[in-house]
Image: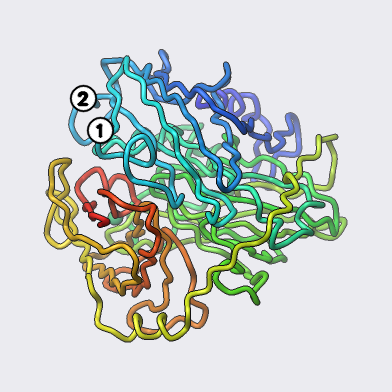
């Protein structure tokens, strides 16, 4: 993947100009990702030149999208063929190159051989075998897998060790999606050199303005790629409706995504269709959507009118005075069909839609009660903490949760940078930010916590499948690696 980016950049460099998209020379069309519906073997490889890590699947360096139906299982043989000696930087030097997989957002067991990142870990030369039983009532939508080796997550995710997971059946709620082109987009990072012509060419390519935006004083370090490409073109005809499924797989960049002159008809966030909890809500029209690292959005997009150029881009996101630069940039250009492409649509799923509304009386009583648990994020020059504790693999659980109930949790950020809160295997209702009730509460599995602020959540701990030792953490993976994580025991 990395080599491919470099190749494209070198090939296209002479054609970059200040005027915007590269229309001269090589056209980079958004690549379709390989898809797999049955058991798969995924191998972690070290690139002999760059020393970076990546996945290999079926002879290709492009991680596949795993497609699974509710009620079926994901079978992955994960071979760790990383080099025993790493040239890369991790929290503890040198990197051990141990690795494992997390199935982000799936309501599955945290115990081996399922979504277990505490006891499952492969050293170079070892293999892990996952059988992950996706429950029949898993909300159908976009999820993702990525490595989750404590103290090495950031480096491995930055190198691209991630992929999309689609739980089929979103058309049970929206049959019209069956007739639209489906586009799965995985946002990752390409690193900018510290200086030099390649840096400025890459910045021009994505219309990135230095010195960035917001209160961070640092220089931008990376730009987004879409399915491994810097600023590809997306084929869409004027007025055409397409179904876009976007995951932000960056380890720490926020993607506040937007289309020029258009909006998204969002049907799901973080894999969760709005209709799952609120059967009357089909979609929400949003001008832009903030995807924290690990966040997903699924939306209907309409092709811009003939003759109008539109981009898919990110807006400036202010991560706070201690945060990293997160400037606006172009992700892709929307162009009418210039290239023949093979149409890809979602597989028709005729199962009955699952609706699991939370009874309003229960929701309100949980919201109005004092928090059963408060997680406080802090940081100093030595590390990152939850409730004053820096995570280690042998930490005891910070708390025990009784399965079968909803709980009010508050996440409080006492730092001058944002942190996205994520808990494994569970979705939660975000209903208040900085103590103020949201106009439109949202079910998510990853939520941004504002600087010096808080979010209030209704945690859904009702699922009896989710039993065992699990985790919650900051999804800026560098912070997770440096301690901003804690165990929770589901009993
Ligand atoms: Cu953080």
The image position of residue 142, as x and y in percent, is 57, 50
The answer, for residue 247, to whether it is visible in the render is yes
Tags 2 and 1 in contact by the CB under 8 Å rule?
yes
Give 338 or 351, whichever is nearer the viewer: 351
Give 472 or 436, whichever is nearer the viewer: 472
The image position of residue 292, as x and y in percent, is 44, 57
- Which numbered tag is attached to residue 90? 1
Give 364 or 307, whichever is nearer the viewer: 364
Q: Is mark 2 within 8 Å of ligand 1?
A: no
Could you give the CA–CA distance between mark 2 and mark 1, rounded to whole angstroms? 7 Å
Density class for disc 1 (Cα within 10 Å; few <14, some 14-19, many ≥20) is many
Quadrant containing ligand 1? bottom left
Give 491 or 327, whichever is nearer the viewer: 491
Q: Which residue is mark 2?
A: 94
Name which quarter of the figure residue 458 lies in.
bottom left
Residue 432, compared with residue 385, is above or below; it is: below
Which residue shows up at 24% across the image and 24% down it?
96
What secondary structure is marked by label 2? loop
Left or right: 362 as drawn, with respect to 484: right
Residue 122, compared with residue 426, is above or below; it is: above
Which residue shows up at 74% across the image and 53% down it?
350
The image position of residue 132, as x and y in percent, is 45, 39
- The scheme the figure's colours follow is rainbow
The image position of residue 411, as x and y in percent, is 28, 68
What secondary structure is marked by label 1? loop
Name which quarter of the figure residue 118 lies in.
top left
The answer, for residue 194, to whether it is visible in the render is no
Name which quarter of the figure residue 394 lies in.
top left
Which residue shows up at 34% across the image and 59% down it?
421
């Amino acid at each position: 993947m990395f080599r491919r980016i470099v190749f494209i950049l070198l090939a296209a460099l002479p054609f970059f100009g200040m005027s915007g998209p590269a229309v001269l020379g090589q056209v980079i069309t958004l690549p379709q990702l390989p898809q797999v519906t049955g058991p798969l073997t995924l191998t972690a490889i070290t690139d002999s030149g760059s020393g970076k890590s990546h996945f290999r699947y079926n002879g290709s360096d492009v991680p596949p999208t795993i497609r699974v139906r509710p009620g079926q299982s994901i079978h992955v043989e994960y071979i760790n063929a990383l080099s025993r000696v790493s040239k890369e930087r991790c929290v503890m030097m040198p990197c051990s190159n141990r690795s494992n997989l997390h199935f982000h957002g799936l309501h599955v067991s945290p115990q081996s051989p399922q979504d277990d990142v505490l006891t499952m870990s492969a050293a170079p030369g070892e293999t892990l075998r996952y059988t992950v039983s996706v429950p029949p009532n898993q909300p159908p939508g976009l999820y993702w897998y990525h490595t989750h080796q404590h103290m090495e997550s950031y480096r491995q995710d930055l190198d691209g060790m991630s992929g999309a997971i689609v739980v089929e059946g979103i058309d049970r709620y929206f049959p019209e999606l069956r007739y639209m082109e489906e586009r799965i987009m995985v946002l990752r990072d390409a690193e900018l050199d510290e200086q030099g012509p390649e840096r400025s060419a890459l910045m021009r390519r994505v219309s990135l303005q230095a010195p960035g935006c917001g209160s961070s004083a640092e220089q931008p370090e990376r730009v987004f790629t879409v399915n491994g490409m810097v600023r590809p073109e997306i084929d869409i005809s004027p007025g055409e409706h397409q179904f876009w499924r976007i995951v932000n797989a960056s380890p720490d960049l926020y993607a506040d995504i937007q289309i020029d002159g258009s909006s998204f008809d969002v049907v799901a966030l973080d894999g969760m269709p709005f209709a799952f909890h609120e059967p009357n809500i089909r979609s929400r029209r949003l001008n832009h959507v903030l995807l924290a690292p690990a966040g997903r959005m699924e939306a209907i997009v309409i092709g811009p009118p003939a003759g109008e150029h539109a981009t898919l881009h990110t807006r400036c996101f202010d991560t706070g005075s201690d945060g990293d630069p997160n400037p606006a940039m172009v992700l892709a250009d929307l162009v009418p069909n210039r290239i023949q492409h093979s149409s890809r649509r979602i597989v028709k799923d005729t199962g009955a839609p699952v609706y699991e509304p939370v009874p309003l009386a229960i929701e309100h009583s949980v919201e109005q009660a004092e928090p059963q648990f408060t997680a406080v994020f802090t940081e100093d020059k030595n590390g990152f903490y939850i409730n004053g504790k820096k995570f280690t693999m042998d930490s005891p659980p910070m708390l025990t949760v009784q399965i079968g109930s909803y709980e009010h949790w508050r996440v409080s950020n006492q730092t001058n940078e944002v942190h996205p809160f994520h808990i494994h295997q569970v979705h939660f209702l975000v209903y208040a930010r900085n103590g103020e009730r949201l106009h439109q509460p949202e079910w998510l599995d990853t939520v941004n916590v504002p600087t010096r602020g808080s979010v209030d959540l209704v945690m859904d701990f009702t699922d009896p499948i989710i039993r065992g030792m699990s985790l919650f953490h900051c999804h800026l993976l560098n912070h997770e690696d440096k301690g901003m994580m804690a165990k929770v025991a589901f009993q």
